[in-house]
Structures are given as C-alpha cells and as structure tokens.
Image (cartoon, helix red, strand yellow):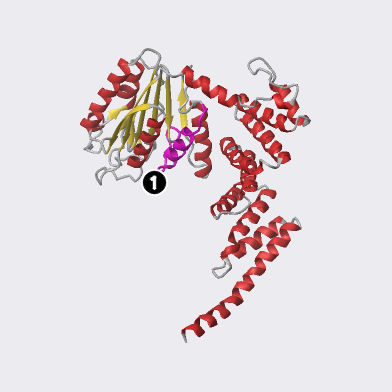
Amino acid sequence: MRVVLIVTFMLLSGIPIQAQYKFYEKGFESYKAGKYSDAIASFSEYLTKSIRDKSLDVEVYYLRGLSYYKSQEFKKAIGDFEEALLRNHANKGNIHWFLAKCNDNLGFFPDAIDAYGNAIPAFQNDKENLVKILYERGLVYLKFGDEVLAYDDFLKAYEIQPGNESVKAEIAKLDKPGLKSRIPTAPKEVVAQPAAAVNTSLADLYKDEKRYALVIGNNLYPKNIGELKNPVNDAMDMAAELEASNFEVQLLTNATYGQIRAALLKFKEKLDAGEQDKTVGLFYYAGHGVRQETENYLVPVDAVIEFEDDIWRYCFPVQRMVLANMARSNSRLNIVILDACRSNPFPSITRGIGDQGLAEMEKARGSFIAYATAPGSVANDGSGRNGLYTQELLKAMRKPGLTIEQVFKQVRLNVLRLSGERQNTWDSSNITGEFYFKF
C-alpha cells in the first residue's frame, strides 16, 4: 500500500512538473531568437513554480542572467550569474567573464577586476579568449587608475598574440617615462611579471615600518541606548585582519569608560615611542556614536546619559582625544575608521545633538579619516555577521597592492551597490605618502 501511494504521488506530481518545463523551453527558444524580454518573462515564471524540476534552476539563472546582460540590465544580470555560481554551474569561466563585463559597465571596477581574475584559469588553453580577457582587464585597470597592472596585462596579451593591434596600441600609449618599455623583439623574451616586481619593492620600502592599532567594538548597551548586533564581530574580524597586515593590535569589546581611557593612553604611548616617520597608527571603532555640535563622541557601554552635558563627561571626543593625540605623535600616518554613524542613541536629548550621523572632522597632520557613511547620514547596523561597511572594508583590505585611497574607493563602490545607493561612505585625507594594507 505504501509503495502504491508513492507511485501514485509521483505520477500525479509529474503532470505539473511537465507543465512548468514548458516555461523553460519557451524561455530557451526566446533566448536563441534574441527575444530577451520574452526569455526573462518565461524564465521568471518558471522560477515562481513551487513544483518544478529544480535541477534546471542553475541553467535558468544562467540563461536569464545572459538575457539581462544582453538587455543591459546589468545589476539584475549580476544577481542571476552569482546565483548560477552558487549552484555550481559548469560554465564558471564564462559566468565570471560576464560578471566582469557587468561590473565594468556599472563602474564597479574592483569587482570587475576580481571577476576577470576568476575567469582567467578557465581559459588557459583558449589563447584567443585569454587575450581578450587580459586586454579587457587591462582597460579596466586604466579606468581604476592603475597603469602598472594595466601595462602588465597588455604585455601578457602581447606575449600570447603579438599580432594583436589593439593590444599593441595600448602598450604604445603606456610606453612613456615612468613605465619602461618592455615590448620584446620576440614574444619568447617577454617577462610579464611587473606586478610581482612592484610588490617586492613595496615590501622592501616599508619593511621597517611599525604599525599599531586600537580596535574597539561595543554591542551591549543599556536598553535606553539600544543594543547593536554587529560591532563586536566587526571589531574582532578587523583586529584579525590588521594583525595579518603586520599591525600590533589592542582589541576591546563591550568596553567601559575606564577601559577605553586606559587603552587610549597605551595607544598614545606606542605611537609616541615609534620611530619618526616610520610609524603608522590606526584607530577603529564600531558602536554607538553621537554628534554634539562639531564634535563626535564614542559611547562606552556603561555611559549614563540623562542630560546633554553628560555626553562630554561620559563619552570620548574623537577629534580632541583620539585624532589630536595621534597627530602629536611620531606617526607618519594616522588612520581613523568610524563605523558609528547610526541614529542618535539619546532621543530624549535633542538640543545641540545631531539627530542624524556624525560630523566631518578637521583633518590633523598626516591623517586619513573614514566614515561608514557621509557626514550627517546614517548607516545600517547590518543583518549578517558584519555591518555592510566593515564587511566590504575587510574584503578590500585583503587585496594586495592597493593604496589606502584605492581600498576605500573600492569600499565606497561596493557599499553603494549593495545598499541600493542608500549608503554613501565618506573619507577625507591630507596624507602625502603612500600606505598599503597588503604588499
């Protein structure tokens, strides 16, 4: 009896599955015919059916992504291509290539560069397409302002296909003072590894640099202030990443006023004792922050704020206590990162307090100041392990060879995209030298 029931169910359920398969067939035929809007409609209809052959979903996402791409709906195409990758589509190389093209069209150049890099291994035996990928990535590097890596890609493409006129034209443009010509007399003489050489010289240049960081993440505030979800995770992950970038890190989580004060004094001592112009200081804070007039304050977990003047008694002024002390030290570069641009945690106190976000601070000597969102705006706490800002910052910091400006430019592009253009990160700088998290 039990077997009969199972067979009966399978026979009955096979009817709607076959019916839904027609949407897939219709979408596929529309795609082949170049009717991309019809293909998108059919594939979308297929994916709404609860009873369907879900083994086809991966191909449906891929084909709908291609349809979106050919319709120039690049953001939607990215979503479908990423879904196809998550479902382990067999054509990973092409998917990464299309992801690169989508991100390039949207102006998300770091993501495009990453996607091209992911596509390259699949085309090692397809020299014609490999040249196209290297050429296209080189053009994206130029848009991103990195002539060295662009030059490297064009040279690699030249080595494979020395007769490619487009590649030769780009090499000729970059054959100028500062980028020594490496066009060979014969393809076999090309040594297409300038990126490695550049990275080695950077590591040598900064080998004596001492790096110190103070990282604070506060979650557990009283109910009247409001608990947060991500800051402790953000701080722990940031501390680990900074240690991987040769920082000596102090980490505080759910810190009281006394703990923060002691840590700031210790941090100041480290920077003061550092060798002149060979020391870098980094201060990172995730948690509640509040703006009072032109100063930003960090809120300890034990802060008791009933009146407006309690803020300067029980909270820490970033400009006067953090940034100013860093600027008076021996550090050549002072980095302050504030993932604290949330709404006013003291709504009962309104006079003199900014209801929305933090204020832009005056720049101290050799300082780079980064905010999770533009001054006067609010950033979301986030729904995953990390807040959106820190999530993207950690990703960008892990990429070798990016200057600090390039890291935060990449963060801004990705946060804008992932927040639907609602969160615009902000940074200001008066640094004159270079800094790399990873060589």
As displayed, is residue 204 above or below residue 51?
Answer: above
- Front-lying residue, 92 or 169: 92
Which secondary structure, mark 1?
loop
Left or right relative to 33: residue 413: left
**The residue under label 1 is which amino acid type?**
Arg
Q: Residue 197 appears at what percent x and percent y?
A: 56, 22
Residue at x 61%, y 77% (from the top left corner): 15
Residue at x 71%, y 27% (from the top left corner): 188
- Asked which quadrant contains residue 235, the reply is top left
Left or right relative to 69: residue 357: left
- Front-lying residue, 309 or 419: 419
Magenta part of the chain: 373-402
Residue at x 66%, y 48% (from the top left corner): 69
Residue assigned mark 1? 385
Does 378 lie within the magenta span? yes
Can the viewer see residue 109 in this picture?
yes
Left or right relative to 172: residue 328: left
